[in-house]
Image (spheres, grey):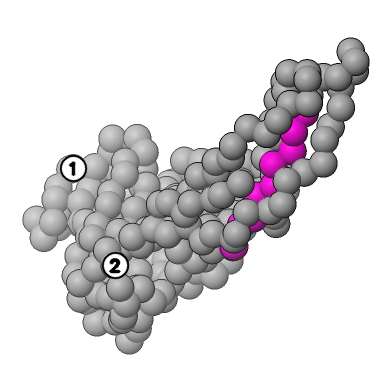
């Protein structure tokens, strides 16, 4: 059999063998090594983030099943295909981007440190930035991770956020009181670009994608933040964040 690498996939093909006089009823293709568990698997490993199943050389074997004399016979497996390595993969650049391991690998900061949440877009974990209730502090609630953008290809960042606020809606620099935002920063905290900045209370998971190819080959910090204005009585702002991925192809 043969295997052909595709974009985050492999296609296998084979020629039907002689059936020896009774019909072949099924084929089974196996790959070596076995893939890691997907997100949602009960051990909750952040498998989607490590990209291991894409980078691994894969071999495939063909098993032939056929009926003969009214009983099922499993014929010996074919020789393995040559190994193939799919391209265009989800990379390993962001660790725990699905927050299935709490806030592991993320750096928290500000007057109100983000916390792990179970209000998830997928899986069972997310990050909660800002303050959902209670006395409102003045300052930031930030979450960051430093990553290296691949030197070649097109790199796209994707993440999901769920915004909540008791403040009036606003966008960008017109936001005077509270807001939620994401920036690309240098590792020393200088802002290189804004990915979004707004305040609203729509409460629905919203996807944002951004082309980070301009930073290829650079080590940058992804910086997420909810800013609170310390009002009394409190008019709090918070957002959940989940499924932060980087795709390079
Ligand atoms: Ca999650
Ligand atoms: Ca406020």
Q: Is residue 115 visible?
A: no
Disc 1: which residue? 168
* Residue drawn at the location 13% of the way across and 56% of the way down: 172
Q: Is residue 222 visible?
A: yes
Q: Which residues are magenta?
A: 56-65
Taking depth in this image into account, of 246 and 170 the one nearest to the observer is: 246
Residue 248's place in the image compared with 11, above or below, is: below
Secondary structure under tag 1 reads: loop
Disc 2: which residue? 153
Indicate the position of residue 201 as horizontal and vertical percent values.
Answer: 28, 38
Residue 245 magenta-drawn? no
Residue 190's place in the image compared with 249, above or below, is: below
Taking depth in this image into account, of 28 and 75 the one nearest to the observer is: 75
Secondary structure under tag 2 reads: loop
For disc 1, the neighbor class at 10 Å (few under 14, some 14 to 19, many from 20) is: few
Residue 119 located left or right of residue 239: right
Indicate the position of residue 173 as horizontal and vertical percent values.
Answer: 11, 60
Mark linked to residue 117? none
Indicate the position of residue 52 as horizontal and vertical percent values.
Answer: 58, 61
Q: CA distance from mark 1 to mark 2?
A: 40 Å
Q: Nearer the viewer, mark 1 or mark 2?
A: 2
């Amino acid at each position: 059999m043969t295997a052909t690498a595709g974009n985050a996939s492999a296609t296998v093909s084979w020629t039907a063998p002689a059936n020896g006089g009774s019909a072949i009823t099924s084929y089974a293709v196996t790959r070596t090594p076995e893939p890691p568990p997907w997100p949602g698997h009960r051990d909750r490993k952040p498998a989607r983030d490590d990209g291991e199943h894409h980078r691994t050389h894969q071999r495939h074997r063909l098993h032939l099943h056929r009926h003969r004399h009214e009983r099922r016979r499993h014929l010996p497996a074919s020789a393995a295909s040559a190994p193939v390595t799919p391209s265009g993969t989800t990379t390993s650049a962001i660790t725990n981007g699905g927050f299935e391991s709490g806030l592991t690998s993320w750096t928290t900061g500000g007057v109100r440190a983000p916390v792990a949440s179970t209000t998830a877009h997928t899986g069972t974990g997310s990050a909660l930035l800002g303050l959902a209730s209670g006395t409102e502090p003045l300052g930031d609630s930030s979450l960051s991770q430093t990553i290296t953008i691949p030197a070649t290809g097109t790199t796209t960042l994707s993440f999901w956020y769920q915004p909540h606020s008791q403040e009036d809606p606003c966008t960008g620099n017109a936001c005077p009181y509270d807001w939620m935002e994401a920036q690309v920063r240098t590792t020393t905290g200088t802002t290189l670009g804004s990915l979004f900045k707004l305040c609203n209370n729509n409460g629905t998971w919203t996807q944002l994608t951004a082309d980070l190819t301009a930073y290829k080959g650079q080590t940058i910090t992804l910086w997420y933040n909810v800013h609170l204005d310390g009002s009394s009585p409190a008019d709090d702002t918070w957002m959940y964040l989940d499924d932060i991925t980087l795709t390079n192809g």
